[in-house]
Amino acid sequence: MTASEKDGGGSRKRPSRAEGAAGRPAGRAAGRSGKRTAAWAMRSAAGQLAELLGRAPESVSAVKRTDDGWEADVEVLELERIPETTSVMGTYHVTLDEEGDLLAYERTRRYTRGQIDRRG
């Protein structure tokens, strides 16, 4: 079950003219050399997740090349509050294939914007 099915779905955002049908930036299928880059994978993951969730991602906190494509962690503002440090954020783990198409996503964490991870 995908995160959208667990959460009851969300509104779908139509891609802007600057984005392709899959929510990826148009004309940016790969780097200058034709090779898929981490920056390309970050844009692809963020754009497609925005289309599915109906919310614009704030940042991509991790990206990793895999044997089958790419994986990325995308930070999304889920609930805006005042003050901003109390807003609720979500981290989504996104899996892309070699072509940059989203295969799966899952919300892995919810936290307040002002929260700091402590390592111990």
Image: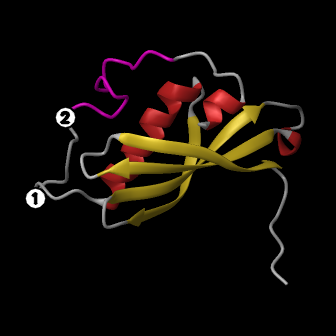
Q: Give the mark nearer the N terminus: 2 vs 1.
A: 2
> At 27% across and 59% down in the image, what residue appears?
37
Q: Is residue 15 magenta?
A: yes
| Residue 97 sits above or below residue 15 on the image | below
**Residue wearing tag 1:** 33
Between 92 and 58, the one nearer to me in the picture: 92
> At 64% across and 28% down in the image, what residue appears?
5
> At 19% across and 49% down in the image, what residue appears?
30
**Residue wearing tag 2:** 27
> Where is the C terminus found, in terms of image quarters?
bottom right
Report the magenta residues as a range: 13-26
Between 2 and 94, the one nearer to me in the picture: 2
Horizontal side of residue 35 vs 115, given as left or right: left
| Residue 73 sits above or below residue 18 on the image | below
Q: Position of residue 106 (x, y in %)?
A: 60, 45
Dot 1 amino acid type: Ser
> Where is the N terminus found, in terms of image quarters?
top right
Say how many tags the image has: 2
> At 43% across and 35% down in the image, what residue appears?
47
Mark 1 Cα within 10 Å, few/some/many (few <14, many 20+)? few
Horizontal side of residue 2 vs 67, given as left or right: right
Mark 2 Cα within 10 Å, few/some/many (few <14, many 20+)? few
